[in-house]
Image (cartoon, grey):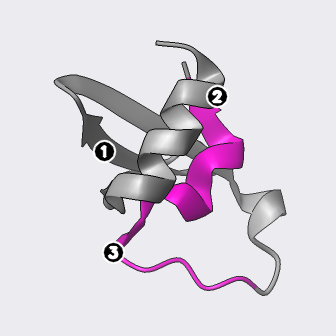
Amino acid sequence: METNDIRKKLYTEKTKATLISIKKEKLYYESALEGNILIFAIPFHDIQDGIFLPEMEARHLFRWIDL
């Protein structure tokens, strides 16, 4: 699946992402999209004053997608 296709689907389907772990100075979120598992790895230095909840809309995490 192409990056643009993933982005479109995350916006149209309002897919949720769940926090699965915090390790090695990163937050890891996981989301399912059309039978595929997407992982979002967010470095602590990117968090700054942002709010990251246990469950979020995956579209807000797209910039950290790990394909």
- Disc 1 residue type? Ser
46 on left or right of 60: right
Q: Residue at x 57, y 14 (%)?
A: 2
Q: Residue at x 30, y 45 (%)?
A: 31
Disc 1 element: strand
Question: Mark 3, mark 2: which one is toward the viewer?
Answer: 2
Q: In the image, which disc is placed on residue 54?
A: 3
Question: Mark 2, mark 1: which one is toward the viewer?
Answer: 2
Q: In the image, which disc is placed on residue 5?
A: none
64 on left or right of 27: right
Q: CA distance from mark 2 to mark 1?
A: 17 Å
Q: CA distance from mark 3 to mark 2?
A: 26 Å
Disc 2 element: helix
Q: Was residue 24 drawn as part of the magenta stretch in this picture?
A: no
Residue 35 picture quarter:
top left
Question: Mark 1, mark 3: which one is toward the viewer?
Answer: 1
Residue 12: x and y, percent?
42, 55
Q: Residue at x 43, y 35 (%)?
A: 39
* Above or below for 53 versus 3: below
Question: Mark 1 or mark 2, which is nearer the start of the sequence?
Answer: 2
Residue 7: x and y, percent?
57, 40
Query: Who is closer to the viewer here, 13 or 35?
Result: 13
Residue on which the image places disc 1: 31
Residue on which the image places disc 2: 4
As drawn, the residue found furthest toward the left would be 35
- Disc 2 residue type? Asn
